[in-house]
Structures are given as C-alpha cells and as structure tokens.
Amino acid sequence: MMFKIKNITHMLTLSGACMSVLLLSGCLSSKDAELKQWMVEQKGNTPAKVTPIVPPKKFVPQAYTQQGAMEPFNNQKLLQALRKDSAQSAENLALISPELARRKEALESFPLDAVAMVGTLNKKNSPVVLLKVDKLLYQAKVGNYVGQNYGRITKISDSEIVLREIAQDASGEWTERKVNLQLQAKEK
C-alpha cells in the first residue's frame, strides 16, 4: 500500500509540473503576439527620414596655358633637379661623414631625455659637467658627445650645457640644431 501512495504522489507532482509548463507557454505566446502587434504599429507610425543625395559638382576642365614654357618632363629640367639634389647631398655628406667616422662615446648610447645635468666642476681651470644616467654619474667636458643625435657639447655653464646636434628632418636631410640641457633640481 505504501508503494501505491508513493507512485500516486509522484504522478501528481509530475502532472502538476506539466500543467505549469503548458500554462506558461500559453502566457508566452499571447505576450509574444502582443509584442509583434506593437512592433508592427510602431513601424507603421514611424516616418522614414531619407535625406536627398547632393548632386555631384560639374567638372570644368582648365585650359593648359603653359604652351611656351618648359615642358615638365624636359631633360634640361631633370638635369637641373639632379644637380640641385647632388649639391644638397654633398652638403649633407660633409656634415654627417665626420660623425660616422669617429668612435662613439659612452653617453651617446642614451637618448637625451634620459640624461640629467646634476652639477658642474672645475678641473684644471676647465669646466666639467656631471651628467646622471640610470643612477650612474658621468663627467663630460666641451667637445664630448651626449645623446643619440650626435650631440656635441659646445658650452658648459653653471645652469646648463649647450649641445650642437645633427639630426634628420622630415625630408631626410641632415641639419644642425642647438639644444640646451638644463640643470636638474635636487630630488628629495
């Protein structure tokens, strides 16, 4: 008898669960239909906003007015441009060649923004600057090189050093520029 009661209880629980699922699916289908109807209404009430395409501008060809001038692909014009380029190349080569021929110094392996001026000294009546890089202290004098752009020290004062750098500009030409490295305040 006990076995029949357990089976009946189990069957009642199972049938209750099935009824719940059926009821819920009926609710979902009615809400789904309402949602679809609302979407159709909203789509019908929303006005379409289409901006008209701007018509293309009319192309007006320009007349060629340089019939009497030198042709752009003339051999003489090309030779003039090549001579000008070779003159600039010779100037650039004269500027950078001595730098490439010499032995690099220790401070040239660091970028200039990683070098800090921390003081100056006088050794044998000649000024010497103290430069700090990666917690190491270096001494340099006028004529030594600092930084990765061939920066040569030209002047040392108590508050700054002046460097002459040779760097490439946007067009690839080597140019000289003056750079100052200021004395850094003491860290606390």
Image (cartoon, helix red, strand yellow):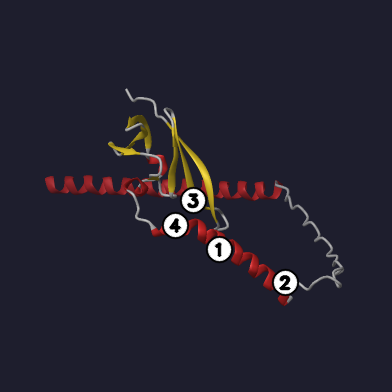
Describe the element under mark 3 as helix, strand or loop: strand
The residue wearing badge 1 is 90
Please give the name of the residue rendered at 68% of the width and 73% of the height, measured from the top-left corner.
79
Residue 77 disc label: 2
Horizontal and vertical percent for residue 74?
74, 76
Residue 71 disc label: none
Camera-near label (3 vs 1) is 1
Q: CA distance from mark 3 to mark 2?
A: 31 Å
Horizontal and vertical percent for residue 93?
51, 61
Horizontal and vertical percent for residue 159?
43, 28
Q: Are marks 4 and 1 in contact (CB under 8 Å)?
A: no
Camera-near label (4 vs 2) is 4
Residue closest to the eye, 108 or 164: 164
Which tag, 1 or 2, sits closer to the chain's start? Answer: 2
Describe the element under mark 2 as helix, strand or loop: helix
Describe the element under mark 4 as helix, strand or loop: helix
Camera-near label (4 vs 3) is 4
Of all residues, the one furthest to the bottom in this rendering is 75
- Amino acid bearing label 2: Lys
Which tag, 3 or 1, sits closer to the chain's start? Answer: 1
The residue wearing badge 4 is 98
Answer few, some or many: residues within 10 Å of disc 2's Cα (few below 14, many 20 plus, some between 14 and 19): few
Describe the element under mark 1 as helix, strand or loop: helix
- Determine if residue 1 is in view: no
Q: CA distance from mark 4 to mark 1?
A: 13 Å
Which of the 4 image quarters holds residue 158?
A: top left
Q: CA distance from mark 4 to mark 2?
A: 33 Å
Residue closest to the eye, 112 or 120: 120
Which tag, 4 or 2, sits closer to the chain's start? Answer: 2
Please determine whether, in this image, residue 24 is positioned above or below residue 160: below
The residue wearing badge 3 is 166
Q: CA distance from mark 4 to mark 3?
A: 11 Å
